[in-house]
Image (cartoon, rainbow, N blue to C red):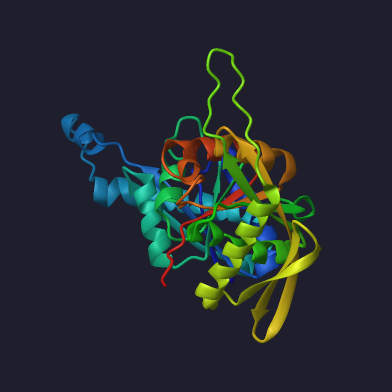
Amino acid sequence: MDVKRILIPTDLSEESNVALESADLFIESFDCTVDLMHVIPLSKYLGDSFDKIGVPLSMDRDIYPKLIENQRKELSAFANKHIKKKEKRGEYIVTIDRKPSDSILSQIEKGKYDLVMMSAKGSHVGEFFHGSATDKVIRRSKTPVLTLSEKMKSDKINTIVVPCDFSNHSLAAIPMAFDLAFKFGAKLEILNVIEMYAHDVHGVEPMSIGIDEEAVYGGLKGRLRSFFKDFKEHDFRVEDGEKQFQDKLIHTVDGEEQTLDFKTVILKSVAAHHEIIDYGNEHADLLVMSTHGRTGLSRMLLGSTAEQVIQHLEIPQVTIKPELKK
């Protein structure tokens, strides 16, 4: 993962500045530049209101430029406060839009960013964050999106967890997780949750099913090897470890090998997303997951349940939307 440019959208509230407060960690780790963006919500009837009351003001000539100028100054002040290295403070982007997510997605594509950082909480009066703009950006962005509810600290990123089913799309999150774990000196865990397809009815406990963890582990490791064989551009290979469920990922970069131990965790649950939320909140400092899945996790990673995972995870998470070409 080569992070050179980061975009941080903010609604300028104190709640939304958690992402901005974490910018220095990525600047130090990746030597990247950070752009800040603010979208001014556009009232559908604002222009009509001025016309009706006879105020001799032009929205395009008088109102919008002043709003943009003021907000750009505020973005600059926020950057000066939170980003130590002046030379790493990039552009201050201010737009006016009825749909903040559309402006953010347009800027992501135009700016060719490597990572988008968004706080999980914003102003209670805005439609900027969960349930609106953040979720739409996560669903539609081709650039990885990091959401967080509190400031990240490098000494707290000890374990990175990647939820995976047997699909290529879920496995495509592993290279990014590897790079982050390698940068932060963190442990890497691959989590597979087997759904039991049973439900708690009238207080009756769901029926427990037996699972052959060794068979699932072997199958998942085999799929991982097949994935890296099919998508050679990642330059990864898997080597067996000395113990079961503990193996090695080896990444070749410019002719040099980077090696990282990883652990495979097999769990079972009535609903995969519940188990991933619980496990992530208890054992991980960062979760990296694909927004596409083909089996099992697809119910968690797509649709309304995706919003539940994002909202209930208390830890930072990176979501990616891989485009696999084979």
Please give the count of numbered marks on the rendered protein. 0
Left or right: where 289 falls relative to 27: left
Percent across and percent down for residue 267 are 66, 42
Q: Is residue 81 visible?
A: no
- The residue at the point 80 percent across, 53 percent down is 155
Residue 268 in which image quadrant? top right
| Front-lying residue, 179 or 71 | 179
Percent across and percent down for residue 140 are 39, 52
Q: Residue furthest bottom?
A: 255
Left or right: where 221 falls relative to 36: right
Q: Residue furthest top?
A: 202
- The residue at the point 47 percent across, 36 percent down is 305
Q: Is residue 135 visible?
A: yes
- The residue at the point 53 percent across, 17 percent down is 201
- The residue at the point 66 percent across, 36 percent down is 278
User: Which quadrant of the rendered structure holds the N terminus?
Assistant: bottom right
Residue 145 to residue 228: above or below: above
Percent across and percent down for residue 240 are 74, 68
User: Which quadrant of the rendered structure holds the C terminus?
Assistant: bottom left
Percent across and percent down for residue 293 are 47, 51
